[in-house]
Protein backbone atom coordinates (compact mmCIF):
# COMPACT_ATOMS: atom_id res chain seq x y z
CA UNK A 1 0.00 0.00 0.00
CA UNK A 2 2.82 2.40 0.86
CA UNK A 3 4.25 2.46 -2.66
CA UNK A 4 0.81 3.00 -4.19
CA UNK A 5 0.09 5.88 -1.87
CA UNK A 6 3.41 7.51 -2.65
CA UNK A 7 2.56 7.27 -6.33
CA UNK A 8 -0.81 8.78 -5.52
CA UNK A 9 0.76 11.79 -3.85
CA UNK A 10 3.10 12.09 -6.81
CA UNK A 11 0.08 12.18 -9.13
CA UNK A 12 -1.47 14.93 -7.03
CA UNK A 13 1.75 16.92 -7.19
CA UNK A 14 2.07 16.39 -10.94
CA UNK A 15 -1.43 17.73 -11.48
CA UNK A 16 -0.39 20.88 -9.62
CA UNK A 17 -3.53 20.46 -7.48
CA UNK A 18 -6.57 22.69 -7.95
CA UNK A 19 -6.46 26.37 -7.13
CA UNK A 20 -8.37 26.20 -3.81
CA UNK A 21 -5.89 23.62 -2.48
CA UNK A 22 -2.89 25.62 -3.68
CA UNK A 23 -3.91 28.50 -1.47
CA UNK A 24 -3.73 26.34 1.66
CA UNK A 25 -0.61 25.67 3.69
CA UNK A 26 -1.83 22.12 4.36
CA UNK A 27 -3.15 19.69 1.78
CA UNK A 28 -6.04 17.87 3.40
CA UNK A 29 -7.16 14.47 2.14
CA UNK A 30 -10.56 13.06 3.12
CA UNK A 31 -10.32 9.33 3.82
CA UNK A 32 -13.86 8.00 3.35
CA UNK A 33 -14.23 4.35 4.29
CA UNK A 34 -15.92 2.13 6.90
CA UNK A 35 -14.67 2.98 10.38
CA UNK A 36 -17.50 1.12 12.11
CA UNK A 37 -19.36 -2.13 11.49
CA UNK A 38 -18.15 -5.40 9.98
CA UNK A 39 -15.57 -3.78 7.69
CA UNK A 40 -14.17 -1.40 10.33
CA UNK A 41 -10.88 -3.28 10.76
CA UNK A 42 -10.13 -2.89 7.06
CA UNK A 43 -11.08 0.79 7.02
CA UNK A 44 -9.12 1.59 10.16
CA UNK A 45 -6.04 -0.15 8.76
CA UNK A 46 -6.32 1.92 5.59
CA UNK A 47 -6.67 5.15 7.56
CA UNK A 48 -3.63 4.36 9.71
CA UNK A 49 -1.61 3.50 6.62
CA UNK A 50 -2.51 6.77 4.93
CA UNK A 51 -1.59 8.67 8.09
CA UNK A 52 1.71 6.81 8.30
CA UNK A 53 2.59 7.66 4.70
CA UNK A 54 1.54 11.29 5.25
CA UNK A 55 3.89 11.44 8.24
CA UNK A 56 6.70 10.08 6.07
CA UNK A 57 6.05 12.63 3.35
CA UNK A 58 5.79 15.47 5.85
CA UNK A 59 9.14 14.49 7.35
CA UNK A 60 10.61 14.93 3.87
CA UNK A 61 9.06 18.34 3.28
CA UNK A 62 5.55 17.31 2.23
CA UNK A 63 4.16 17.71 -1.31
CA UNK A 64 5.00 20.92 -3.17
CA UNK A 65 6.31 22.20 0.14
CA UNK A 66 2.94 21.69 1.83
CA UNK A 67 2.10 19.34 4.69
CA UNK A 68 -0.35 16.49 4.19
CA UNK A 69 -3.19 15.93 6.64
CA UNK A 70 -5.46 12.89 6.46
CA UNK A 71 -9.00 13.43 7.77
CA UNK A 72 -11.06 10.31 8.44
CA UNK A 73 -14.77 10.07 7.61
CA UNK A 74 -16.90 7.00 8.45
CA UNK A 75 -19.12 6.01 5.52
CA UNK A 76 -20.43 2.86 7.24
CA UNK A 77 -19.85 1.05 3.92
CA UNK A 78 -22.98 2.70 2.58
CA UNK A 79 -23.10 4.56 -0.77
CA UNK A 80 -25.63 7.16 0.41
CA UNK A 81 -23.75 7.82 3.65
CA UNK A 82 -20.55 8.10 1.61
CA UNK A 83 -22.00 10.98 -0.40
CA UNK A 84 -23.00 12.72 2.83
CA UNK A 85 -19.40 12.39 4.03
CA UNK A 86 -18.00 13.57 0.68
CA UNK A 87 -20.16 16.68 0.92
CA UNK A 88 -19.00 17.27 4.50
CA UNK A 89 -15.39 17.04 3.33
CA UNK A 90 -16.02 19.49 0.49
CA UNK A 91 -17.79 21.88 2.87
CA UNK A 92 -14.69 21.71 5.08
CA UNK A 93 -12.57 22.87 2.13
CA UNK A 94 -11.12 19.46 1.21
CA UNK A 95 -10.61 18.83 -2.50
CA UNK A 96 -8.93 15.41 -2.45
CA UNK A 97 -11.05 12.35 -1.65
CA UNK A 98 -9.74 8.82 -1.17
CA UNK A 99 -11.71 5.60 -0.75
CA UNK A 100 -11.16 1.92 -1.45
CA UNK A 101 -13.54 -0.46 0.30
CA UNK A 102 -16.68 -1.23 -1.66
CA UNK A 103 -17.11 -0.82 -5.41
CA UNK A 104 -20.74 0.22 -4.88
CA UNK A 105 -19.46 3.09 -2.76
CA UNK A 106 -16.83 3.90 -5.39
CA UNK A 107 -19.46 4.04 -8.13
CA UNK A 108 -21.52 6.51 -6.11
CA UNK A 109 -18.48 8.69 -5.36
CA UNK A 110 -17.16 8.78 -8.92
CA UNK A 111 -20.60 9.80 -10.23
CA UNK A 112 -20.91 12.47 -7.55
CA UNK A 113 -17.43 13.85 -8.24
CA UNK A 114 -18.02 14.01 -12.00
CA UNK A 115 -21.28 15.95 -11.54
CA UNK A 116 -19.85 18.21 -8.84
CA UNK A 117 -16.87 19.16 -10.98
CA UNK A 118 -19.06 19.94 -13.99
CA UNK A 119 -21.11 22.29 -11.82
CA UNK A 120 -18.20 23.87 -9.98
CA UNK A 121 -15.40 24.80 -12.38
CA UNK A 122 -12.28 25.94 -10.57
CA UNK A 123 -13.25 24.01 -7.43
CA UNK A 124 -12.70 20.51 -8.78
CA UNK A 125 -12.46 17.49 -6.49
CA UNK A 126 -9.97 14.66 -7.11
CA UNK A 127 -10.98 11.07 -6.26
CA UNK A 128 -8.13 8.65 -5.46
CA UNK A 129 -9.39 5.05 -5.41
CA UNK A 130 -6.91 2.70 -3.74
CA UNK A 131 -8.82 -0.57 -3.78
CA UNK A 132 -12.36 -0.60 -5.26
CA UNK A 133 -11.77 -2.92 -8.20
CA UNK A 134 -15.01 -3.48 -10.10
CA UNK A 135 -13.92 -3.24 -13.78
CA UNK A 136 -16.89 -0.99 -14.57
CA UNK A 137 -15.27 1.86 -12.64
CA UNK A 138 -12.60 2.37 -15.29
CA UNK A 139 -14.72 1.26 -18.24
CA UNK A 140 -18.38 2.27 -18.44
CA UNK A 141 -17.96 4.70 -15.53
CA UNK A 142 -14.59 6.07 -16.64
CA UNK A 143 -14.12 9.54 -15.17
CA UNK A 144 -11.27 12.00 -15.70
CA UNK A 145 -11.22 12.88 -11.98
CA UNK A 146 -11.06 9.27 -10.78
CA UNK A 147 -7.64 7.60 -10.35
CA UNK A 148 -7.49 3.92 -9.35
CA UNK A 149 -4.20 2.45 -8.09
CA UNK A 150 -5.19 -1.23 -7.86
CA UNK A 151 -5.60 -3.85 -10.59
CA UNK A 152 -9.26 -4.47 -11.38
CA UNK A 153 -11.14 -7.65 -10.50
CA UNK A 154 -10.78 -9.18 -13.97
CA UNK A 155 -7.00 -8.77 -13.90
CA UNK A 156 -6.87 -10.46 -10.51
CA UNK A 157 -9.08 -13.33 -11.70
CA UNK A 158 -6.88 -13.74 -14.78
CA UNK A 159 -3.92 -14.33 -12.48
CA UNK A 160 -5.89 -16.62 -10.18
CA UNK A 161 -7.28 -18.83 -12.95
CA UNK A 162 -3.90 -18.99 -14.70
CA UNK A 163 -2.58 -20.42 -11.44
CA UNK A 164 -5.46 -22.89 -11.24
CA UNK A 165 -5.33 -23.99 -14.88
CA UNK A 166 -2.54 -26.63 -14.68
CA UNK A 167 -3.72 -28.06 -11.33
CA UNK A 168 -5.51 -31.23 -12.32
CA UNK A 169 -6.59 -31.90 -8.75
CA UNK A 170 -9.18 -29.13 -9.15
CA UNK A 171 -12.38 -30.78 -10.39
CA UNK A 172 -15.29 -29.23 -8.51
CA UNK A 173 -15.39 -25.53 -7.63
CA UNK A 174 -17.80 -23.64 -5.39
CA UNK A 175 -18.22 -19.89 -5.85
CA UNK A 176 -19.22 -17.83 -2.82
CA UNK A 177 -19.18 -14.06 -3.01
CA UNK A 178 -20.68 -10.89 -1.57
CA UNK A 179 -23.88 -9.66 -3.18
CA UNK A 180 -22.85 -6.31 -4.63
CA UNK A 181 -21.10 -5.10 -7.76
CA UNK A 182 -17.63 -6.42 -6.88
CA UNK A 183 -18.81 -9.86 -5.76
CA UNK A 184 -20.94 -10.14 -8.87
CA UNK A 185 -17.92 -9.21 -11.00
CA UNK A 186 -15.82 -11.89 -9.29
CA UNK A 187 -18.39 -14.63 -9.94
CA UNK A 188 -18.87 -13.56 -13.58
CA UNK A 189 -15.13 -13.50 -14.27
CA UNK A 190 -14.60 -16.83 -12.52
CA UNK A 191 -17.27 -18.54 -14.60
CA UNK A 192 -16.03 -17.05 -17.85
CA UNK A 193 -12.34 -17.75 -17.28
CA UNK A 194 -12.75 -21.23 -15.84
CA UNK A 195 -14.91 -22.17 -18.81
CA UNK A 196 -12.25 -20.91 -21.21
CA UNK A 197 -9.22 -22.38 -19.43
CA UNK A 198 -10.59 -25.49 -17.73
CA UNK A 199 -13.91 -26.52 -19.29
CA UNK A 200 -13.66 -29.84 -17.44
CA UNK A 201 -14.09 -28.14 -14.06
CA UNK A 202 -17.60 -28.43 -12.65
CA UNK A 203 -19.03 -25.42 -10.81
CA UNK A 204 -21.06 -27.14 -8.11
CA UNK A 205 -22.32 -24.04 -6.35
CA UNK A 206 -22.66 -20.31 -6.92
CA UNK A 207 -23.70 -18.32 -3.87
CA UNK A 208 -24.13 -14.60 -3.22
CA UNK A 209 -24.65 -13.39 0.34
CA UNK A 210 -25.32 -9.98 1.95
CA UNK A 211 -22.27 -7.73 2.29
CA UNK A 212 -20.76 -7.66 5.82
CA UNK A 213 -24.07 -8.80 7.38
CA UNK A 214 -23.49 -12.53 8.03
CA UNK A 215 -22.34 -13.39 11.55
CA UNK A 216 -22.33 -17.18 11.10
CA UNK A 217 -21.34 -18.82 7.83
CA UNK A 218 -22.09 -22.36 9.10
CA UNK A 219 -25.16 -22.77 6.84
CA UNK A 220 -23.13 -21.70 3.80
CA UNK A 221 -20.29 -24.05 4.71
CA UNK A 222 -22.80 -26.91 5.10
CA UNK A 223 -23.92 -26.29 1.49
CA UNK A 224 -20.30 -26.26 0.30
CA UNK A 225 -19.60 -29.52 2.12
CA UNK A 226 -22.71 -31.18 0.68
CA UNK A 227 -21.76 -30.10 -2.86
CA UNK A 228 -18.59 -32.19 -2.86
CA UNK A 229 -16.47 -29.20 -3.88
CA UNK A 230 -12.71 -29.61 -3.68
CA UNK A 231 -12.01 -25.89 -4.20
CA UNK A 232 -13.59 -22.53 -3.40
CA UNK A 233 -13.25 -19.23 -5.25
CA UNK A 234 -14.21 -16.15 -3.27
CA UNK A 235 -13.61 -12.42 -3.36
CA UNK A 236 -14.80 -12.03 0.23
CA UNK A 237 -12.95 -9.54 2.40
CA UNK A 238 -12.87 -8.20 5.98
CA UNK A 239 -15.37 -9.87 8.33
CA UNK A 240 -16.90 -11.89 5.49
CA UNK A 241 -13.58 -13.60 4.77
CA UNK A 242 -12.56 -14.15 8.39
CA UNK A 243 -15.90 -15.61 9.47
CA UNK A 244 -16.14 -17.80 6.37
CA UNK A 245 -12.74 -19.32 7.16
CA UNK A 246 -13.70 -19.75 10.80
CA UNK A 247 -16.90 -21.60 9.90
CA UNK A 248 -14.98 -23.80 7.47
CA UNK A 249 -12.46 -24.71 10.15
CA UNK A 250 -15.18 -25.42 12.72
CA UNK A 251 -16.91 -27.75 10.26
CA UNK A 252 -13.67 -29.52 9.30
CA UNK A 253 -14.12 -28.50 5.67
CA UNK A 254 -11.16 -29.77 3.62
CA UNK A 255 -10.95 -27.74 0.42
CA UNK A 256 -8.48 -25.50 -1.38
CA UNK A 257 -9.24 -21.78 -1.22
CA UNK A 258 -8.60 -19.52 -4.21
CA UNK A 259 -9.14 -16.00 -2.97
CA UNK A 260 -8.35 -12.34 -3.46
CA UNK A 261 -8.14 -11.34 0.18
CA UNK A 262 -7.22 -14.25 2.41
CA UNK A 263 -4.24 -12.14 3.45
CA UNK A 264 -6.52 -9.41 4.79
CA UNK A 265 -6.80 -8.32 8.39
CA UNK A 266 -8.41 -10.98 10.59
CA UNK A 267 -8.47 -13.67 7.90
CA UNK A 268 -5.16 -15.24 8.88
CA UNK A 269 -6.41 -15.69 12.41
CA UNK A 270 -10.02 -16.62 11.68
CA UNK A 271 -10.31 -17.95 15.21
CA UNK A 272 -8.92 -21.49 14.87
CA UNK A 273 -8.54 -21.51 11.11
CA UNK A 274 -5.00 -22.07 9.95
CA UNK A 275 -4.13 -21.84 6.25
CA UNK A 276 -1.50 -24.48 5.65
CA UNK A 277 -0.22 -22.96 2.42
CA UNK A 278 -0.62 -19.52 0.90
CA UNK A 279 0.64 -18.69 -2.57
CA UNK A 280 0.63 -15.02 -3.52
CA UNK A 281 -0.19 -14.08 -7.09
CA UNK A 282 -0.52 -10.33 -6.88
CA UNK A 283 -0.41 -7.87 -4.01
CA UNK A 284 -1.82 -4.40 -3.65
CA UNK A 285 -2.60 -2.12 -0.68
CA UNK A 286 -3.96 -4.57 1.90
CA UNK A 287 -5.33 -6.64 -0.92
CA UNK A 288 -3.83 -9.87 -2.15
CA UNK A 289 -4.65 -12.40 -4.82
CA UNK A 290 -3.67 -15.69 -3.28
CA UNK A 291 -4.42 -19.38 -3.15
CA UNK A 292 -4.91 -20.83 0.30
CA UNK A 293 -4.44 -24.58 0.18
CA UNK A 294 -6.15 -26.39 3.01
CA UNK A 295 -7.79 -25.04 6.15
CA UNK A 296 -7.57 -27.07 9.33
CA UNK A 297 -8.17 -26.61 13.02
CA UNK A 298 -5.22 -25.61 15.14
CA UNK A 299 -3.58 -22.68 16.85
CA UNK A 300 -4.04 -19.38 15.06
CA UNK A 301 -0.85 -18.14 13.39
CA UNK A 302 0.00 -14.99 11.56
CA UNK A 303 0.60 -15.27 7.83
CA UNK A 304 3.98 -13.73 7.09
CA UNK A 305 3.71 -11.94 3.80
CA UNK A 306 6.52 -12.28 1.27
CA UNK A 307 8.15 -9.09 -0.06
CA UNK A 308 5.83 -6.79 -1.96
CA UNK A 309 5.29 -7.85 -5.55
CA UNK A 310 5.33 -5.20 -8.24
CA UNK A 311 2.63 -5.67 -10.88
CA UNK A 312 4.16 -5.54 -14.36
CA UNK A 313 1.82 -7.65 -16.40
CA UNK A 314 0.41 -11.12 -16.32
CA UNK A 315 3.62 -13.00 -17.23
CA UNK A 316 5.41 -11.78 -14.14
CA UNK A 317 2.41 -12.48 -11.90
CA UNK A 318 2.70 -16.24 -12.47
CA UNK A 319 6.47 -16.25 -12.13
CA UNK A 320 6.33 -14.34 -8.87
CA UNK A 321 3.62 -16.65 -7.60
CA UNK A 322 6.01 -19.58 -7.98
CA UNK A 323 8.91 -17.64 -6.50
CA UNK A 324 7.07 -16.27 -3.48
CA UNK A 325 5.13 -19.41 -2.51
CA UNK A 326 5.03 -19.49 1.28
CA UNK A 327 4.37 -22.54 3.42
CA UNK A 328 2.54 -21.75 6.66
CA UNK A 329 2.28 -23.92 9.77
Image (cartoon, helix red, strand yellow):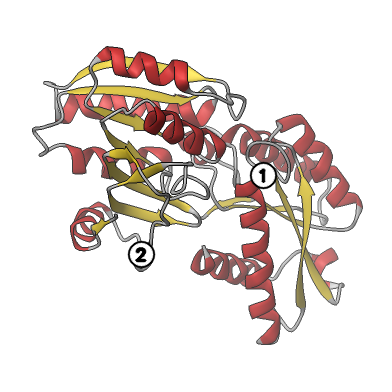
Residue extending farthest to the front is: 298
- Would you say 45 lies left or right of 122 here? left
- What residue appears at the point 58 percent right and 24 percent down from the top-left corner? 214
Q: Which mark is residue 40?
A: 1
Q: Secondary structure at mark 1?
A: helix
Locate residue 55 relative to residue 328 in the image: left or right: right
Name the one closer to the observer, 300 or 138.
300
Q: Is residue 101 visible?
A: yes
How far is mark 1 from mark 2, CA to CA? Answer: 27 Å
At 53% from the left and 68% from the top, the residue drawn is 2
Residue corresponding to mark 2: 310
Mark 2, residues whose alpha carbon is within 10 Å: few (<14), some, or many (≥20)? few
Q: Residue at x 53, y 38 (%)?
A: 137
State the image coordinates of residue 280 (x, y, percent, origin top left). 30, 53
Instruction: State the residue in front, 269 or 25.
Output: 269
**Relative depth, front residue between 2 and 65:** 2
Q: Is residue 38 above or below residue 277?
A: above
Contact between labelled residues 2 and 1, with CB atoms less than 8 Å apart: no
| 149 shown above or below 25 | above
Q: Which comes sooner in the sequence, label 1 or label 2? A: 1
Amino acid sequence: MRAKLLWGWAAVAALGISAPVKAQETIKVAFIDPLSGGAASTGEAGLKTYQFVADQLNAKGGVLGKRIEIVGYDNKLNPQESLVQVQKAIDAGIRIITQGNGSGVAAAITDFVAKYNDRNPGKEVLYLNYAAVDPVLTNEKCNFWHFRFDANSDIKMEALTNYMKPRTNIRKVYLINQDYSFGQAVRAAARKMLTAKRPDIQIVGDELHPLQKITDFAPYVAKIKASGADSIITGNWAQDMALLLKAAADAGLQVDWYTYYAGGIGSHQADRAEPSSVRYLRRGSQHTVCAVTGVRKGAAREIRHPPAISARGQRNADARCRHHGSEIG
